[in-house]
Amino acid sequence: MDKFLRWKDSSSRTDDEEPSTSVTKNLKKVVKRKYDEDYIKYGFSWCGDETAPRPQCIICGDQLSNESMVPSKLKRHLYLSHPTCANKDKQYFKGCLEQNKKQKKFMKSAVTVSEKALEASYHVVKLIARQKKPHSYCRRNTY
Ligand SMILES: [Zn+2]
C-alpha cells in the first residue's frame, strides 16, 4: 500500500499532468463511502454522520476513517486485531453488537443512578446540617 502511494506520488511529479491529478484528488474528497449491512460479517458497525459514516469495530470499538469503509480494510482490521474472531459469522457479530448496545444503556442508567445518589447524599448532608439546629431547638422545647 505504501509502495503504491509512493509510486503514485513520484509519477505525478515526473509527468506534468496536473489536471488529471487534481481530478483524482477532488474525487477522493467527494466520494463518501456508505455502510453496507453486509460489513457486519467483518465485525463492523458504523458511527458518526450518516452521509459519511465511519466504520466502528464491534469488538474493540475502534473507529476507522470513512475511507476505510471497504471490505478489504475492515477485513484487515478483523484479521490482524482479532484473529480469534476472524472465522465468526454475522450472527456472532450481531450478538456482540446487541450486547454492546445493552451495555451502553446499562452504563447510562448507572451514571444517572449515581447522579441521583449524589444528589440524594447532598440532600442528606443538608438535612443533617438542618438537624444540628433543632438540637438546641429541642432543648429549648424541654425548658
Ligand atoms: Zn477491533
Image: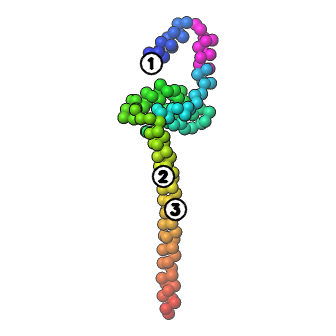
Q: Is residue 63 visible?
A: no
Q: Position of residue 92 (x, y in %)?
A: 44, 39
The structure residue drawn at horizontal position 49% and vertical position 45%, both measured from the top left corner, is 98
User: What residue type is disc 2 on?
Assistant: Met
Looking at this view, is 143 or 60 the one in front? 60
User: What residue type is disc 1 on?
Assistant: Asp
View extreme (top): residue: 15
Q: Is residue 108 left or right of residue 30?
A: left
Looking at this view, is 14 or 54 the one in front? 54
Q: Is residue 75 left or right of residue 29?
A: left
**Residue tagged 1:** 2
Distance from the alpha carbon under mark 2 to that under mark 1: 41 Å
Scheme of image coloration: rainbow
Q: Is mark 2 within 8 Å of ligand 1?
A: no
User: What residue type is disc 3 on?
Assistant: Lys
The structure residue drawn at horizontal position 58% and vertical position 30%, both measured from the top left corner, is 34
**Residue tagged 3:** 116
Q: Looking at the image, tell me whether mark 3 or mark 1 is earlier in sequence order.
A: 1
Helix, strand or loop status at disc 1: helix
Residue 107 numbered tag: 2
Distance from the alpha carbon under mark 2 to that under mark 3: 14 Å
Question: Mark 2 against mark 3, which lies toward the viewer?
Answer: 2
The structure residue drawn at horizontal position 61% and vertical position 36%, both measured from the top left corner, is 50
Q: Looking at the image, tell me whether mark 2 or mark 3 is earlier in sequence order.
A: 2
State which region is magenta: 16-26
Magenta-colored stretch includes residue 63: no
Distance from the alpha carbon under mark 3 to that under mark 1: 53 Å
